Amino acid sequence: MTPASGPPGAAAIAFRIAVLIAVVLLGTWAAHEIRDAMNLHIMPSNEQQVHRAVMLAIVAYVGLLALPFVPGAEIGIALLTAFGAAIGPLVYGATVVAMLLAYTVGRCVPITALGRLLSLLRLHRAADLVARAAPLGQEARIALLLDRAPPGLLTLALRRRYLALALAVNVPGNSIIGGGGGIMLLAGMSGLFAPVPTALAVILAVSPVPLAVALFGA
């Protein structure tokens, strides 16, 4: 008879944390390297190489921006700075794809994984709340959170959660809470955000910078 597996030991937990930190550091390094590589000048002799570099940068931008805590947005800013309004729509579309990719991955991860993470961080009350919400549908989860949330900003954020999501994705310094990718990943995991309103919120939320570049130039 196979013995039941218990919770992971300290060594296993430390290893998982180390892997996550390594992924974030590697992603951050890659973002900085790609940003610096975007200091390009288009000439007849290198137009094809520049085009290839831009396409690779866009693919990397989508992947890195979708990762929590990785400053992938720097690549988009570097592209806008280097190529101006002409590349604005491409950067905008890539940003939307990255945010929705992170959200979709979050939708595929069971909310119990969030509960385990909270337990690992010793946030036992939050982990217990997640455990209670896990078997519930979206509306029941929202009702449970509203019942437990103190009146004020948190309650308002729950009731206007799509607006709150759009603001969180755009707020300067959001990298300390996971960046756009981390925020969208948690949004997907929470089960509180339906796909279509979330997509509309993202489409509006990421538009200001590309729109400003398109209207006023880099």
Image: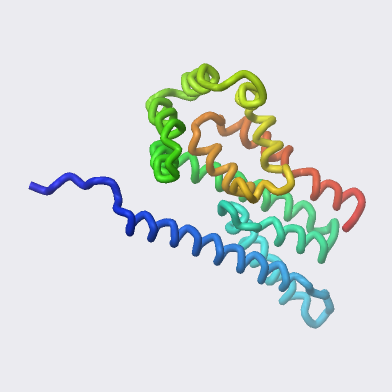
As drawn, which residue projects farthest toward the left? 1
Percent across and percent down for residue 116 are 39, 41
Q: Residue at x 79, y 74 (%)?
A: 40
As drawn, which residue projects farthest toward the right? 216
Quarter-wise, where is residue 154 in the image? top right
Q: Residue at x 42, y 41 (%)?
A: 122
| Quadrant the C terminus occupies | bottom right
Percent across and percent down for residue 156 are 66, 22
Q: 55 or 95: nearer the eye?
A: 95
Percent across and percent down for residue 16 are 40, 57
Coloring applied to the structure: rainbow
Q: Is residue 130 left or right of residue 212?
A: left
From this viewpoint, is residue 113 visible?
yes
As drawn, which residue projects farthest toward the bottom? 45
Percent across and percent down for residue 85 are 85, 56
Quarter-wise, where is residue 32 in the image? bottom right
Q: Residue at x 54, y 44 (%)?
A: 185
Q: 145 or 86: nearer the eye?
A: 145
Q: 21 or 135: nearer the eye?
A: 21
Q: 201 or 36: nearer the eye?
A: 36
From this viewpoint, is residue 109 visible?
no
Q: Is residue 125 left or right of residue 146?
A: left
Looking at the image, residue 67 lies above or below residue 49: above
Q: Residue at x 57, y 47 (%)?
A: 182
Q: Is residue 2 left or right of residue 211?
A: left
